[in-house]
Amino acid sequence: MAKTLVQEQFGKTAQGYLTSKPHAQGKSLDRLVTLTTPQKSWRMLDIATGAGHVAYAFAPHVARVWATDITDEMLDLVRSEAAKRELANVRTAYAKAEALPFEDASFDLVTCRIAPHHFDSIAEFLSEVHRVLAPKGTFALVDNVVPAGSVGDYINAFERFRDPSHLRAWAMEEWRAALTTAGFAIAHEEQLPKTMEFSTWAARHDATMQALLRSMLIEVTPDVRAVLAPEEKAGQFTFRLSEGMFIAKAA
């Protein structure tokens, strides 16, 4: 079977996501644990686990963590890393976010962090999350978010130019509406800025492509500049993205 664009992209860069600062050290990782107050008896599912950072963070606090992904290289990495960290309650499984291989009401907590902007169907993803959650179970979602309108459209185009597997980051308002439609009651939401180091973010590309991406950060309208906040300081070029976080209950 031919690999999808997402599988190709993340298969090639799996190891890099283990040490990627936004994934391994982002503010939202600690916030997820704090806001969900995990219990030792809980069964947990982490969808599109990537390098497994959410699974590692929660494993000491719950009974079992299933970490799923569609990229074999990521799953191999998680199995290896969980063993190194002596997290015996972490299990891995191949699973598409829109078609989870678990029975109804199987989990007390479902998490998904910095991944839905790659998914084929957010509606199907949310439907599956609701299906596998136990009644009154908790869903903790984090993803890149953009402002509504033309500024958000530009940021999505910019992200997709760097990574073609990026489909679309949503606005907070869109997530709010989609969660409600899918049958979730939102208990908490917040938006977290994150500073991106351009050299690391663009490292997968050659110098010509990096120059083009850099120009897309600099040669922008004032509205876009105000959101992306490109800055050169002490020889380091940075810009800003945002993550939206939602803690919701299965109604």
Image (cartoon, rainbow, N blue to C red):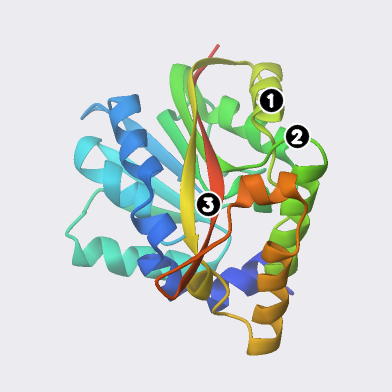
Between label 3 and label 2, give the one nearer the viewer: 2
Placement of 9 over or under 160, stated as above or below: below
Secondary structure under tag 1 reads helix
Task: Name the amino acid type tagged 3.
Answer: Ala
Residues under numbered marks 1 and 3 in contact, where contact means CB atoms less than 8 Å apart: no
Tell which circle, 3 or 2, labels the residue nearer the N-terminal end: 3
Tell me which amino acid carries mark 2.
Ala
Q: CA distance from mark 1 to mark 2?
A: 8 Å
Give the labeled residue for mark 1.
Answer: 173
Q: For this rendering, which residue is in front, 187 or 182?
A: 187
Q: Which residue is mark 3?
A: 48
- Residue 196 screen position, x and y as percent: 49, 60
- Quadrant location, the C terminus: top right
| Residue at 42% across, 56% down | 23
Above or below — where is 217 with respect to 134?
A: below
Mark 2 neighbour density, 10 Å: few (under 14) some (14–19) many (20 or more): few
Q: Residues within 10 Å of mark 1 (few under 14, many from 20)?
A: few
